[in-house]
Amino acid sequence: MFKRSLFLGTVLAGMAVLATALPASKAAAQVTLRNVMHSDLKIIDPIWTTAYIQRNYGYMVYDTLFAMDEKFEVKPQMVDKHEVSADKLTYTFTLRDGLLWHDDQPVTAEDCIASIKRWGARDSMGQKLLSVVKEFQAVDAKTFKLILKEPYGLVLQSLGKPSSNVPFMMPKRVAETDPMTQISESIGSGPFMFKRDEWKPGDKAVFVKFAKYKPRAEPPSALSGGKVVKVDRVEWLAIPDHQTAANALIAGEIDYMEQPTHDLLPVLKAEKEIGIIDWNPLGNQYTFRFNTLHKPFDNEKVRQAVYYAFNQEDFLKAVVGDAAYYKLCKSMFPCGTPLESMKGTEGILESNFAKAKALLKEANYDGTPVLLMHSTDLSVLTNLAPVAADLMRKAGFTVDMQSMDWQTLVARRSKKEPPAQGGWNAFLTSWVAADILNPVMVGFLNASCEKAMFGWPCDPEIEKLRDAFAKETDPAKQKAIAEQVQARAIQYGTHIHLGQWYQPAAIRKQVVSGFLTAPAPVFWNVTKK
Amino acid sequence: MLMFVARRLLATIPVLAMVAVFVFLMLRLTPADPAAILAGDNATTEQVAQIRAKLGLDQPLLTQFAIWGGRLLHGDFGESFFFKKTVAELIAQRLEPTLALATATILLSILIAVPLGVIAAYRHETWVDRFVMALSVFGFSVPVFVIGYLLIYVFAITLGWLPVQGYRSITQGFWPFFERLILPASTLSVIYVALIARITRASMLEVMNEDYIRTARAKGLSDRVVLIRHGLRTAAIPIVTVIGIGIALLIGGVVVTESVYGIPGIGRLTVDAVLARDFPTIQAVVLLFSFVYVLVNLLIDLAYVLLDPRIRY
């Protein structure tokens, strides 16, 4: 009897202790945001590669001197104030007070100069900027000057470039790493610290709040403003199977899924706890790329025939399907951005096969097959090539569509050999709109022959206009030049823009909130109940 | 016996050498370029070429093979192009989930399939036998991912009893470890249950017609003793062979299950490495699979000695 009472007493006392301990432990519990991103994090150098998962990692760990806001305006971020000399040749930047690296060392002007130099060695916009930079001068620990050889209109736009490669600031010792060698450190000054000891490629990447991060006072706006972190920890889980990730979201095992495929959206929308958010209202743009080195696309008229054969809706319907997630846009620069324009687009992209056939006849097209590379393993690209092949055949082209996985396509597109020797004539891809906001950013508008991106267009006029755009400091005149670039690019035939499409994210709407609309997914300002 | 084991182990060397040459050449002859993948979509041709040179992929094929082969002889599998970690470290990180899943699957399969096969043989040509065989056909016919998604829908989403995905190491507690293995191991075991149950039934049927079984029965031994001690032990050799081959297949064949359940094992590592053309990792994983196959075959041969005293090496 005594033993039984003792036992009951012990159990009751234990329960009382637990009852008092539970609220305390709940209060002390860490708030962890669990995300499934579009890809696994394998590399931790956002300057060395242009892949978007590294860009997203960069926004977690690093900070930028300037950043783009929701109105596409470049705003100071790490910079407190900046001055431009009257001759527009000297830019003086002063850093904000209290900026610290994750190892508690202060951020200095020397760190920023080294970071800009490393970024400028890799990024095309950075290379263009550095080509007009005469020198950098560190004035004191917080101030540095950028001195130009000639006026340049894209200094702040370059330093506030929103997408790959983003000019992230790193400690000098890290930024002095050879730009061709990957860095192995993950010390930044951004709002999150990377937990390298918990990083398991193929499993998860972990970030924790950097308690000493000093956010700006302004409210957050896209990539600019106050980066206030409202969770303790963010985990990026590697779940490659979209269906499994969607199931995990429904079951409450994750809070955020960056890129559910469009066919999963109706399933997710039907779940009352799941919300769909459009975090990147600019979206993406589908693009058809010519290889101008070989027949038949070495002929400008043949390339123009394709502009007349295509229409955007067929591509967008075939891949995205739901009209809520695509937009017809004949502007080369994304619709909804400052340089949107319809200049030079009259008559094209309307599937005018009669006009396309007439152009082919004019060009004496002899039926040389177009080797069209068809990517089969990325759902957002798979249906593009069959639509392109069909429309081109209707216009009178002979098309040899060859199917392959995306990585084989990536390797093959860098080959300059003729199609019969392992080369190619055309392929289709997609650009994040934030990467194609102006003529200098659009990689496919680089028409510098051998130095251009795969496809190697060669047109001195386009290059002259792009240089003029970069040097122009008046936004109105910049827009006029951008329109000329667009008209000339369509006339020459660098690439064909096939409309905008949107990739929403899925979240547990009753648990998480505060996601910002921005060109890249960011996790400051996000709260979790 | 020891000489036999030593001979068999020595025989693995030329096998692995041939696999090494084959996999090296196969990878280099495929059209993909790891440098282009590493550089990202916005990289220029010049940047891709610089990365290619950095990785040594611009060297002649023979030079690349000599460097890799030389390292291999010193037990160095090299460094992954992507992860910037040694391949040995990557494999070590991924081995535990795969081994746990394979072990759970094999144990579950044996525990279900062997009794089912024995019962089907014992109740030969009755509804029990037909039911077991129908289950077996079902197990062979339904793809693994369909079973996986069905189990997830029922047990994880509808009932909420088990997690949808993920893996926890046993060091993080037994239940978190075990609960995440139940669905994947059940999914994966379906086909092995079908295979082992069928083989067990066939083998038992053959044995049960032998004279010594009739003698055992004539001695008045119970059905249980006749079936298990006299029947199953003799029928075990083909069953053990199938289980052994199953283990070897499992190590490399868990790709779909690991993907469906988000388990960071060797199967996922292999798929990731192949998609990214991470040559050092693919080469090491293929060599590891080959070694496991050879080793498992050796263990099966040794198990024969224990099961049948007449067998000598």
Image: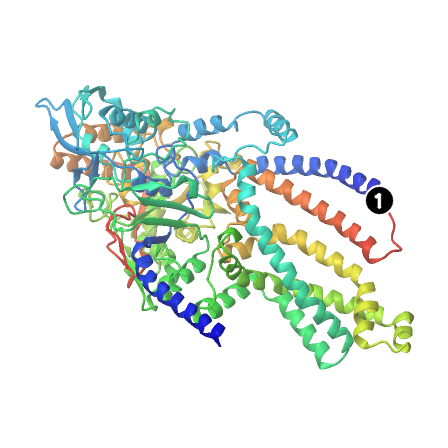
Pick whichever, A121 or A529, lies toward us. Answer: A529
Residue B138 appears at what percent x and percent y? 63, 70
Left or right of B248? Residue A329 is: left
* Colouring used for the render: rainbow
Residue B258 appears at what percent x and percent y? 53, 54
Left or right of A522? Residue A86 is: left
Label 1: few (<14), some or many (≥20) within 10 Å? few
Pick whichever, B6 or B280, lies toward us. Answer: B6
Pick whichever, A108 or A179, lies toward us. Answer: A108
Name the residue at the front extreme: A2
Marks counted in the figure total 1
Residue B28 appears at what percent x and percent y? 58, 35
Pick whichever, A424 or B295, lies toward us. Answer: B295
Q: Is residue A335 above or below residue A78?
A: below
Instruction: Name the residue type under label 1.
Output: Met
Residue B185 appears at what percent x and percent y? 58, 61
- Kindly identify the residue that appears in the image at 77 percent across and 73 percent down: B121
User: Can you see residue A430?
Assistant: no
- Kindly identify the residue that appears in the image at 46 percent across and 68 percent down: B161
**Residue picked out by circle 1:** B1
Q: Indicate the secondary structure of the residue bearing disc 1.
A: loop
Quadrant (top left, top right, bottom left, bottom right) of the C terminus of chain A:
bottom left
User: Can you see residue A453?
Assistant: yes
Name the residue at the bottom extreme: B127
Left or right of A173? Residue A238 is: right
The chain holding disc 1 is: B
